[in-house]
Image: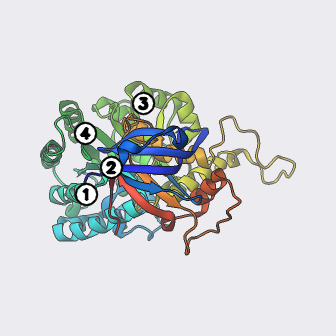
Amino acid sequence: MTDHKYVFYGTIIDTPDPLTLRIRKQHVCVVNKGKIEIIEPSASRNLDEHQNFTFIKLNESQFICPGFVDLHCHAPQYRQAGSATEVPLLEWLSKFTFPNEARCSDPSYARDLYTKLVSRLLRNGTTTTQYFATIHLEATKILADICQEKGQRAYIGKVCADQNSPDFYIETADESVRNTEEFINYVHHMQKGRDVAGTNALIHPVITPRFIPTCSINLLSQLGQLAKKYDVHVQSHMSETADQVAFVHYLYPSIGNGRDVAIFHETGLLTNKAVFAHGVYLADNEVDEMITRGSAVASCPVANFLFSKGVTAIEHLRNRGLNVGLGTDIGGGYSSSMLPVVRATVFANRTMDFVSFDRSNATLPLFPEHKDAVIDFKYAFYLATLGGAQALSIDSQIGSFEVGKQFDALLIDCNKENQAFDYWKEDEMDIIFEKWVNAGDDRNITGVWVQGIKVECT
Ligand code: GUN
Ligand code: FE
C-alpha cells in the first residue's frame, strides 16, 4: 500500500466537545493524501469512484477513534518508568533521574531506548507526543529521526539546564542556547523535506527549559528570545509540588513575585505556543495571566498522585478559559499508555471533593455537590485527544474526525481473544467504548494511522 487511500465503513467515535460522545454508526470515512475527504452515512454515498482505495469494513465489535495526544513525556525516563515511585520529586530527580538521563550522552544507548519507546507509544495508540529529551544535542536529534522514521507526530525539545544539576549532567547557558538553536534548525531542515510551510510536518522543535530551578535567568531570557525569533513551541514544568514552588521563590524572590508564571512571563517564555506540565498550585490571577498569553497546561495525574499531594483543577482552569490536555509524564508517571492517564484524570477529579470531607462526621454526604462539572470517561477522552490538540494549537488539524482534518486514528476491536475485559454483543456502542476506555488496553488496538499512513508498531 503506497498511496494510502482508505475507505472505512462502520462506526466512527470521537469527542467534539467534553460533554459529547459522538457515535456515527454505518458511516463511511474516506481518507486520501493524509486527510479526511468524506464522512457520511454510508447509505447516502456512492463509492464507485473509490475503487482503487483500500476498503476496511468494521464489524459490530470494532470502531475507529482519534489517536491520543500525550502532551508531556520524558523520553529518556522510559528506562526508569515503573520504578522509584515512592520518592519525593526533588530527591527522585537527583537520585534516579539525572543519573539515568545522563546515559543519553551515548548516542547508541539513546537510539536503542528511543526506538523502543516510540514503538511502544504507537502501539499504545499515541499518535502525537510532546517530548522532553535530554541536554544532549546528538541524542535529541536521534529522537527526532526515530519519530520521523516511525511516523509519529512529535514535538521535541532538547532539555536546558545550567544550574542546580550534578556535574555530570549540566551545560553552560551558552551551550544550552547554541544547541537549542541548532536543534531548531535541524528540525526545520527535516520539515522542508515534507512541505515548505511546515504545516504537514510531523516533527516540530520545542524550546525546553527543564524547570525554573535548573535554569539561570540569563538562560531563560535567551531561550525567551529564541522563542520569539523562531516562533516555535515552548514547554517546561510549572507549579508541580510545594517544595518546587518554594525552591523557585527562594532562588528568585524578586523576579516578578518569585512564582513560576511571573518568571516565565518576565523571561519571554509564557507564549501562545507554550505548554506547562502540572499547574497544580496555580492562583486564579496566574491562570488568568496564562490565558491572556495563550499558554496551556498539561495535566499529568499519575505523576501528580505520586509527587504533588494535589491534582490539577482541570474543570476550574477550563471554566476560566485555559486550554488543558493530558500527559503521561513518563517516568514520573509509570504508564506509557494514555488510557491509565484518562482513568487517573477521572479519579483526580473525584478527589476534589475529598478535601472538604470530614471523616469523623458520618452524616456528611460522601460526594457533596460539585461546583464544577464532573469529569467522566468521555470528558477525559476529550482531554486526551482534542484537548491536547488545542493545547498545541493543532486542533484544526487533528483530535477529532472532520472533513479536511488529518487522519490520526486508531482501529479498536473490543472482541479480541486475549483482551483484558469481556465482550457482550448485546452491549450498545457507547457501553463498549466506555468499557474499552476503562478496562481495555493495547490488545484492542488493531491499527494505528498517523496522517493517513498506517504505522508499524513492533
Ligand atoms: N521537574 C523537573 N524535572 C522534572 C521531571 O523530570 N519530572 C517531573 N515530573 N517533574 C520535573
Ligand atoms: Fe515532567
Distance from the alpha carbon under mark 4 to that under mark 1:
17 Å
Q: Who comes first in sequence, dot 1 or dot 3?
A: 1
Whole-angstrom CA distance, mark 4 to mark 3, is: 17 Å
Q: Circles 4 and 1: CB distance less than 8 Å?
A: no
Quarter of the rendering containing residue 260: top left
Q: Circle 3 sits in a helix, a strand or a loop, which is it?
A: helix
Label 1 residue SS? loop
Give whichever of discs 4 and 3 has the lower sequence position.
4
- Residue toward you, 235 or 238: 235
Residue type indicated by callout 4: Leu
Observer-nearest residue: 266 or 236? 236
Q: Position of residue 413 (x, y in %)?
A: 53, 62
Seen from this angle, which residue lies furthest right? 363
Task: State the residue at coordinates (41%, 67%).
Answer: 81
The answer to whether residue 255 shows anywhere in this view is: no
What residue did someone put label 2 on? 5
| Amino acid tagged 3 | Met
Please state, as top left, top right, bottom left or bottom right, where the C terminus lies in the image: bottom left
> Can you give x and y, in whole percent of width and height, for residue 304 in the image?
51, 53
Rendered-image quadrant of the N terminus: bottom left
Q: Do callouts 2 and 1 mark residues in contact (Cβ within 8 Å)?
A: no
Which residue is drawn at the image coordinates 41% and 54% (left, top)? 55
Q: Earlier in the sequence, mark 2 or mark 1?
A: 2
Q: Residues within 10 Å of mark 4 (few under 14, many from 20)?
A: many
Label 3 to label 2: alpha-carbon separation: 41 Å
Q: Earlier in the sequence, mark 2 or mark 4?
A: 2
Q: Is residue 240 left or right of residue 75?
A: right
User: Residue at label 1?
Assistant: 134
Mark 3 touches mark 2? (CB < 8 Å): no
Between marks 2 and 1, how big is the CA–CA gap? 38 Å
